[in-house]
Image (cartoon, rainbow, N blue to C red):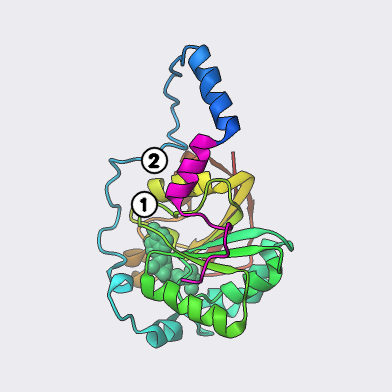
Amino acid sequence: MLNVPSGRYPPPIMRVATLFLSPVTSLVLLYLALAGCQSTPTPSSTAGSPSIEEASVRPGINDSFLQPNLDIEQWTARFEVESREVFRLRETIVQTLDLKPGMEIADIGSGTGLFVPYFSQATGPEGLVYAVDIAPDFTAHIDERATEAGLKNVITVLCTDRSVELPEASIDIAFICDVYHHFEYPHSSMTSLHQALRPGGEVVLIDFKRIPGESSEWTLNHVRAGQEVFTAEIEETGFEKVAEYPILEENYMVRFRRK
Ligand SMILES: C[S@@+](CC[C@H](N)C(=O)[O-])C[C@H]1O[C@@H](n2cnc3c(N)ncnc32)[C@H](O)[C@@H]1O
């Protein structure tokens, strides 16, 4: 991973320590103690609560990314090729995101990093790009790629299959392209992402249209569910759908806002 600029990305354990020592948190804890710490009713939605019990919705789907010594050339040839719609239309996709200089974006499941240079340029020197993936060989590759290209606002994050491992309230927008159907524990991953987003922060989802009778056999077998199911799952973790962009044919692109 890239050397993290000092103070920009404290490890989670440091953040927890900082959190408990902060004066604001101390005041909140004092208030709760004085108020008698009434337990609140359990909300019907599970938004914000990581599900420890969540079972994998697709065991083994990421095995090919998690092997040691990934063949990066082979994956680059597969992901960064004109026949792949999201690669061919990458510039349109990035324009549609409408990123502003200074924004902090997380590319969740960044793979070979095809979007990273575009995000780096759009967010600029005051912005930050977190390239987040569960596959160490992909994050190492993006480190090399960013160093070679002189992209100084890129940080790679090796996350887990249940958590994006980003600091709380650290990002403005999360980009999830061709990744949601790879989440083995979607509720847990989305809950951790909800916590990583600032209030009003957004998630942009791109995934394959999966329509029985229309989609290819490969899509029907590889992608576990269609847009309605993924939308409902994401809304369940505390997001509302705010826009849909009909710019793609094989995929859909939807924006959600953190509630
Ligand atoms: C099909 S690739 C897409 C890569 C990239 N987004 C693109 O469009 O070129 C899926 C990526 O998601 C990553 N991934 C799978 N599960 C993940 C999770 N729970 N959190 C973060 N990344 C994950 C995989 O390692 C892989 O790099």
Q: Secondary structure at mark 2?
A: loop
Q: Is residue 41 visible?
A: yes
Q: Earlier in the sequence, mark 2 or mark 1?
A: 2
Q: Is residue 201 left or right of residue 70?
A: right
Give residue 225's position: percent from left, percent from top: 38, 55
Q: Is residue 233 left or right of residue 122?
A: left
Question: What residue span does the magenta drawing correspond to?
Answer: 1-21
Question: Is 13 one of the magenta-colored residues?
Answer: yes
- Is 193 in front, or is 170? 170
x 46%, y 42%: residue? 16
Instruction: Report crowding for label 1: few under 14, some 14 to 19, many 20 or more residues within 10 A (C-alpha).
Output: many
> Does residue 213 appear anywhere in the picture?
no
Tell me if residue 91 is in the magenta stretch. Answer: no
Quadrant of the drawing holding the C terminus: top right
**Regarding ligand 1, which quadrant of the image does it lie in?**
bottom left
Amino acid type assigned to the residue bearing label 1 in the image: Arg
Label 1 within 8 A of ligand 1 by Cβ? yes
* Residue at the right extreme, as displayed: 101
Q: What is the C-alpha distance between the residues marked 2 and 1? A: 9 Å
Question: Which residue is denoted by mark 1 in the rendering?
Answer: 162
| Residue on which the image places disc 2 | 50
Which of the 4 image quarters holds residue 240? top right
